[in-house]
Image (spheres, rainbow, N blue to C red):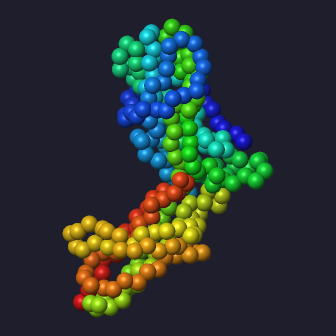
Amino acid sequence: MRRRITVLAAVGAVATAVVVAPAAHAEGRGDIRVTRTVVNGGSNVIVGVTNVKKFTIAMTIKDNSGVKRVNSVSAFNRTNGYGPVDHLGTSCKKVSTTTSVCTATMQIDPSWIDSYGSGNEGWDANAVAGNWRVDATVAANDGDYWISDAIGFFKVKRAATLTTDATPEPVRKGGTLTVTGKLSRANWTDLRYHAFTKQVVKLQYKKPGGAYSTVKTATTDSKGHLRATVKATASGSWRWAFLGTTTTMKVVSTGDAVTVK
């Protein structure tokens, strides 16, 4: 197993949101500490099959002499150590004499996820998805430094797609409406979307101007297909909604409007 660690100096820039980071197991010298970390603005990092995904790691760092720089920052899967991510650079903004917010810009390119671990026996590119952690080494103006392990946690998830088709359109009042769909998710081995099987998905309905509510659930078959039948009582829109998993994003389909006559 491999993980990528890049060392870059910090220069001035602006960071955004902050959240409290878990306690870190660390070592070093002096009183410098990473006190808060936020990854991707607090959202999951979603990776598809084509577009490069860039995200930020914003670290609040404190030392009585002031913060000098971030020596290194890395991110990788907590379970298997896989970290196919590039560190593009880190910039810091001084917010007081003792505190700076330093923001690292990272990227994951789906086109090279599979080649990252190709030399490992039993390698599965999709095992990159899941729970990740952040490590960093930070330095102060007075020579203090701190090697900070597990200063933040986040999820890298496979992108997903979901469709809805309700038929017939229009439908007579009291008639049977059949709602179908398909759930697929990104596969980082061949860079295509494949059926996501055996997943429970919610069928939702709303009247014009109203809010969606769940009517029933269905489970995807061996090809990712969904199918449900309902009694048509009033015009409105139908959609499928998938809550996601630890490794796959949540996704809601576009609504399909049906007129009841």
Tell whether 196 sits left or right of 41. Answer: right
Total marks placed: 0
Q: In the image, what residue occupies the spot 70% across and 39% down?
A: 2
Residue 52 in view, yes or no: no
Quarter-of-image position of residue 3: top right
Residue 201's x, y, as percent?
46, 69
Q: In the image, what residue occupies the spot 51% across and 57% down?
A: 245
Q: Vertically, is 10 above or below 185?
A: above
Q: In the image, what residue occupies the spot 53% across and 48% down?
A: 156
Residue 42 in view, yes or no: yes
Quarter-of-image position of residue 239: bottom left
Q: Between residue 250 and residue 214, name the one nearer to us.
A: 214
Q: Between residue 84 and residue 81, name the one nearer to us.
A: 81
Q: In the image, what residue occupies the spot 50% across and 61% down?
A: 160
Quadrant for the C terminus, please.
bottom left
Quadrant for the N terminus, please.
top right
Q: Vertically, is 29 above or below 152?
A: above
Q: Vertically, is 74 above or below 108?
A: above
Q: Between residue 176 and residue 168, name the one nearer to us.
A: 176
Residue 169's x, y, as percent?
33, 86
Residue 71's x, y, as percent?
57, 22
Q: Residue furthest left?
A: 209
Quarter-of-image position of residue 158: bottom right
